[in-house]
Image: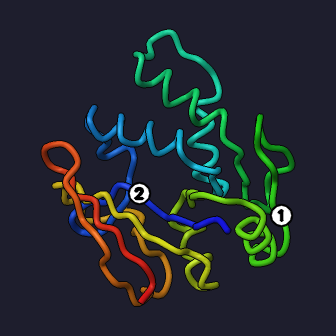
Amino acid sequence: MAKLVFGMNQSLDGYVDHMAFGPSPTLFRHFIEEARGQAGSVYGRQMYEIMRYWDDDRPEWDDDERAFAAAWRSQPKWVVSRSLKTVGPNATLLEDDLEGAIRKLKAERAGEIEVAGPVLAGSLTELGLIDEYRIYLHPVVLGHGAPYFTGPRPPLRLVTHDRIGEDVVRLTYVPA
């Protein structure tokens, strides 16, 4: 049975914003290894559209960016959307019965499946389907933006924490 994991970069005041701050080279390499080891990813529409950036090679990319793109492209993706009519390579559109589709996915797969996007994660949290939360805490204060937790705050239990690079702490929680 697969484990559903929601992990994102977060500011000290609880917001996610890939345009306001990004990973250091050390953290980016960590994300490459994570992507290589994942059984797949589940995306909401907005996050999927952002991540489609990795579908096309760009001449300005360095070796790490090419490695991440290769890892991202190779894994299966499931996109939750009622507005999209098609999705890109190695992706499947999930339009109806979110709970049933995710339960089936977890039952049929092994390993970790990433949940990408706070809105989708909020829906899956309300359904009790997320098995682990990984907060990559950055020393940045935004004061506004999209919160990491978009719905009711689930009761959580800290299971581990570690430092990645010089200034990011990964906090790993499971539902309490």
Indicate the secondary structure of the residue bearing disc 1: loop
For the image, the number of numbered tags is 2
Q: Which one is closest to the eye, mark 2 or mark 1?
A: 2
Q: Based on the displayed image, in which of its 4 quarters is residue 147 positioned?
A: bottom left
Tell me the tag on residue 8.
Answer: 2
Question: Is residue 151 shown left or right of residue 163?
Answer: right
Residue type pointed to by label 1: Glu
Q: Residue at x 79, y 57 (%)?
A: 83
Type of amino acid under label 2: Met
Q: Tell me: residue 159, above or below residue 37.
A: below
Residue 104 position (above or below residue 22): below
Task: Residue at the far left: name it.
Answer: 166
In the displayed structure image, the side of residue 132 where residue 57 appears, left or right: right
Neighbor class of circle 2 (other Cα within 10 Å; few <14, some 14-19, many 20+) is: many
* The C terminus - image quarter: bottom left
Q: Nearer the viewer, residue 84 or 62?
A: 62
What residue does disc 1 label? 95
Q: Are marks 2 and 1 in contact (CB under 8 Å)?
A: no
State the image coordinates of residue 63 (x, y, percent, origin top left): 42, 17
Q: What residue is at 31 percent from the left and 46 percent from the top?
A: 20
Q: Is residue 134 above or below residue 84?
A: below
